[in-house]
Structures are given as structure tokens and as C-alpha cells.
Amino acid sequence: MSTTAASHLSPAFPERAAWGTASKLRAWQQEALAAYLESDAKDFLAVATPGAGKTTFALRIAAELLERGEVRAVTVIAPTEHLKVQWSEAAARVGIQLDPKFSNSSAVHSDEYDGVALTYAQVASRPDLHRRRTESTPTLVILDEIHHGGDARSWGDGIRDAFTSAQRRLSLTGTPFRSDTNPIPFVRYELDEAGILRSAADYTYGYAAALRDAVVRPVLFLAYGGAMRWRTKAGDEIAARLGEPLTKDQMAQAWRTALDPKGEWIPSVLAAADKRLTEVRRHVPDAGALVIATNKTVARAYARILESLTGEKPAVILSDDAGSSARIEEFAAGDSRWMVAVRMVSEGVDVPRLCVGVYATSTSTPLFFAQAVGRFVRARKRGETASVFLPSVPVILEHAANMELERDHALNRKSDAESEASMWAEEEGIIAAANRTEKTVGLEEETFEALESDAHFDHVLFDAQQFGLHADVGSDEEQDYLGLPGLLEPEQVSALLHERQAKQSKSTGRKPRGPEAPVSAHRALAAQRKELNKLVAAYAKKTGAPHANVHMELRRACGGPELAAATSEQVAVRIEKLRLWFVGRR
């Protein structure tokens, strides 16, 4: 074990570091190390954006504490089996030997190891075992992606029970926020000016700072909308355009229709992403791409589409097992074009050559989105950019626009309880169960049937600014954005996007859409009621029924209160229902 080796481990292990930083700790890592040593605290929380080099920072601390004799063992806790191996490989580079195959059943490891690498699930299944191990030897516990340890959950209860007696605890996260309000073990909370308890990091290094330091890549988000058609459980066929205002249920169904591999949206977007990858590889020859899929069935279907497009069979990562780890490592070390994964590659897994991504999952939590995008932002040399293809879904576009915001975990914030519970339920299953299920989360298969879809290019989102006008897939206008060079400084990207937009605007005669003025809730609802009343009047004229009777029939069919008390979503449902009545679908 060597602090010198730890100081000279690549800041972006397991691949080369960002330009100009390979021979020493990055500035933020050195600053965070100084803060840690000065604090001399039992608990320390370091928040650093995905791709910044948290592993190198943590191993430098481990080497320091082992050399001083303050601890005699190191235990690393990670979310997945693959990350256990990744941590062990990194630790070995600095002379710290961790056993990633430690088993709860055998409960022992060879004396040649300085500690073990475990998963949160492994600790939760036998916290008593790991408590005894921790009590027997002065131990540094490194809790990777600590946000998974929310209280009142088995993982949180497990690590609290197992590691309360640890000599030192170092907590790491790239996304210090959760969708629920359960406290995270070993994290300090402080009241802010509004009286809300928020997580207090001992050191923070956000995406915006990392971007300024060229530690991470800037991200181009390419949004695609399109026409969708699906059939509901009741047998009604619904048509809508992804990217236009829809009710919550309609948006969910349009989104899932877009992700259906039998439609045209996914093949079109995969083809566009592959064109983008080809352009990036002109300047970054080993650049790779990743599709994040919702479940195993669609992942296999996406892989078949990619194989037909490229003539090359993509790596398919379906579950968190030893075979999947080997396939990830093989892909990371090679130069093949595509990998398709069911969520598991979204967090912590390091494949630094990933430059292009397709967000083809219906998971919508900010935590998952940030972790997914984090797979593409690790910089290896100056000028590399990341390109992530997204569906034109408002919640996803909002996450993309908020990439540079720094968040804290709030315990007592005011929120919609039902919404929070729903978001947590979705997020909770991502690591534990996503790779074991063939079904998507949310809409059950028997309540929904995707019929057809197509795609069109909507816009590029870069540095929280929107560029581009709607363009057909395969058009010259779309190609102008797909063909941006793969090696550019952020200011060069911005300049080229402005240039491309001006060219498109001139050739089409359309002007870029300016920022939309916010519409107050009462005005939006008034406009919906006006639209409904017009439809009711037209339908009453067509059928000869009084207006009041039409409104009553709609209430019986759709539920909810009278129009004056109906919410925006309830009015939208009635509008859609009445449109179906016009074409005889009652």
C-alpha cells in the first residue's frame, strides 16, 4: 500500500485522466483530501459529479489512513456486483487488496487482503456478520453512492446496523438527492434559511465546476418527437404527438409507444445516434455508444435493430452477474461501436470511451437520469463532447436543462405525497430488480398496446439553450446537427449550433422559437374550458341534445366534478373523450 501510488493513480481510473491531470491528483481531489485530513471527523460526505474521480480520491484517503495506522482494514460498499470488482481493481493499483468475492456464507477472507468489497444488498442480508467484522478491526468504511442507503429501507437499516462502530466512514455520491424524504445513514442534515433540513456535504464538486475545469465533457442533448398511435384497454385508439402538451396518462402512453421496437421511432433514433457516433469517431476513434433500455425484451430487440443498421453485433448487458461484468470490461477495453443495457450501466460503471447515448427507458426520476448521463461525461482529453439522444418528454427535457444545478437531499420539504411515493417506488427498483423483470414499470401490458410511431428531430439542448427547428429524420437539416465535429471546446460547440440554427432558419423561412412566456394556471384552465365548451356546442348541434346533457354524459363517462370545479387534467380527459364521440367511438 502506498500513498505515493494513490496520488499518482489516474484521476479517472480505470482509463487515462482528463487533459493535463494524469500525473497527479486533480485540484478538487487535493482540496477535498486536505479538507478530510483537517476535519479529522469520523464521518465525511464528498459529493462529486459522475466522472470526476471519486474512486481515486477515496483510495488516496484509504492509503493515508492505513499508512498512519489509524485503520487496519478497508470495507467498500457499492450498489452492484460489477462495481465491487471495479473498486477492487482500482485499489490493487495502489497496493490495497480488497476481496470482491467475499461471501456471507463463508464469512472469512484470506490474510492477503486488506479488506473486502460488498454490495448494499449483501450487507442488508447479514448486518450482524458485518457488524462483528467491523468491531473486530479498526476499519475505514467507504460507502459508494450513499444515496442508496435511505433510512427505513433494508439497505439503510443494514448499513446503519453494520457500520455504526466503524473507525472512519467516507460517504461518496454523485447525486446527493432522493425522491423520498427518508434520512440517509451517516449523513449530516442542517436547517436552511427556509427551515428545511438538507444534507450537508463536507466537500462538493459539481458538474458546472467540473465542466469549467475540463474534467467532464459538455453534453449535447438531441431531442426527438414524432407521431404516436396506441390502443387503450377499452379498445380506443389514441393518436398524439410526442413533444406536444398532453395529459399525464397520454404522455406516458405516447412515451412507451415511442420506445416500442416494433414502431419507427426507435429505429429512426438509433440510426441518427449511429450517424452521430460515426462523426464522433472521426476525431475519437474508439468512441462507443450505449442504449439504456427499460427491460430485457426490448433490449434484445434494440440490439437486433442496431445489428441490422451497423452489421456489427452490439454487446448486450442484461443482468448484474459475473458474465455481464466481463462483457462490460471487454467492451470498455475494445473499440466496438454499441452496447445495450438494462439500466445496470447507469450508475458507477466506468466505460470512459462512451461518447454517445440513447435514453430509451421510461424511468423518469432525476436521480436515475443524472446517473445515466454520468456514464457519458467522463473526459479523457480536452475537447471531447458527449451526445445523448432523448425523447421529447417534458420531464426528461427538464432534467437535461437542469444538469448544471447542484441539489441537496431535503428531509422536510413540502411535496405532493402521491407523486413522491410514485417516484420513490420507481427509483427503489432500479438497482434491485430492473434486470430481473421482463415487464416495464407503470403501464401493465394488458392495459396498453402500441400501434405505430414515427420520429422527427425536435432540437438540440446545450448549455441550457435550445437550438434548431423541427426537421425530418434523414434530412439535411438534421444532418447539420448530427455532423458536428466530435472534438470541440464548449464555446466552439455553442458557436456552431448558432450557425447551424441560422442556416436552418434561412433555408426554411422559419424563425427559432423564443422562450415561451409562462402561462398562469387559471389562464391555461380557462382556455381548456373554452375548448371543451366549443366541442360540447358542436356535438350538441350534431346530435340535437342539450348542452347540459352532453356535459352530464361526459361526467358520467370520465368521472370528476362539474366543469367549474374540474382540474386541468380532468378537462383534458373530457376533451379527448368528446373527440372520440365525434367519430363514433363511445
Image: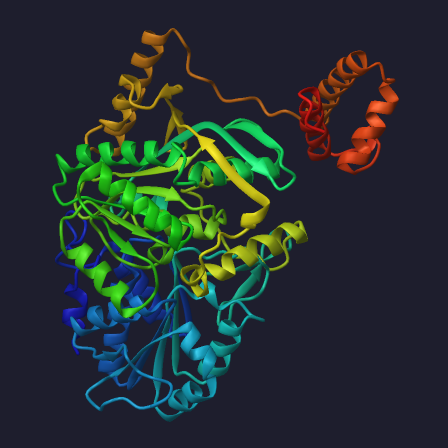
Residue 443 in sight in this render: no
Image point (35%, 50%), residue name: 299
> Residue at the location (17% across, 53% down)?
17
Give the residue displayed 43% in from the left and 79% down from the top: 123
Q: Residue extending furthest bottom?
A: 136
Q: Position of residue 424 (x, y in %)?
A: 56, 57
Residue beneath the point at 49% across and 61% down: 429
Q: Nearer the viewer, residue 527 or 320?
A: 320
Indicate left or right for 39 with 27 as reference. Answer: right
User: Residue 498 at what x, y percent from top left?
Assistant: 31, 20
In the displayed structure image, the side of residue 396 where residue 275 appears, left or right: left
Q: Quadrant of residue 323?
A: bottom left
Quadrant of the drawing holding the N terminus: bottom left
Decide: is 434 above or below 309. below
Report the side of 426 relative to 301 (left or right). right
Q: Which quadrant, please, contains the C terminus?
A: top right
For the residue pair 441 and 171, the one nearer the viewer reads as: 441
Q: Is residue 272 above or below residue 6?
A: above
Q: Mark yes or no: residue 54 visible.
A: yes
In the displayed structure, does residue 203 sit left or right of residue 237?
left
Q: Is residue 220 above or below residue 580?
A: below
Residue 127, position as x, y percentages in the image: 46, 83
Q: Is residue 120 above or below residue 333?
A: below
Tell me where residue 194 appears, x and y as whole percent. 63, 51
Figure label count? 0
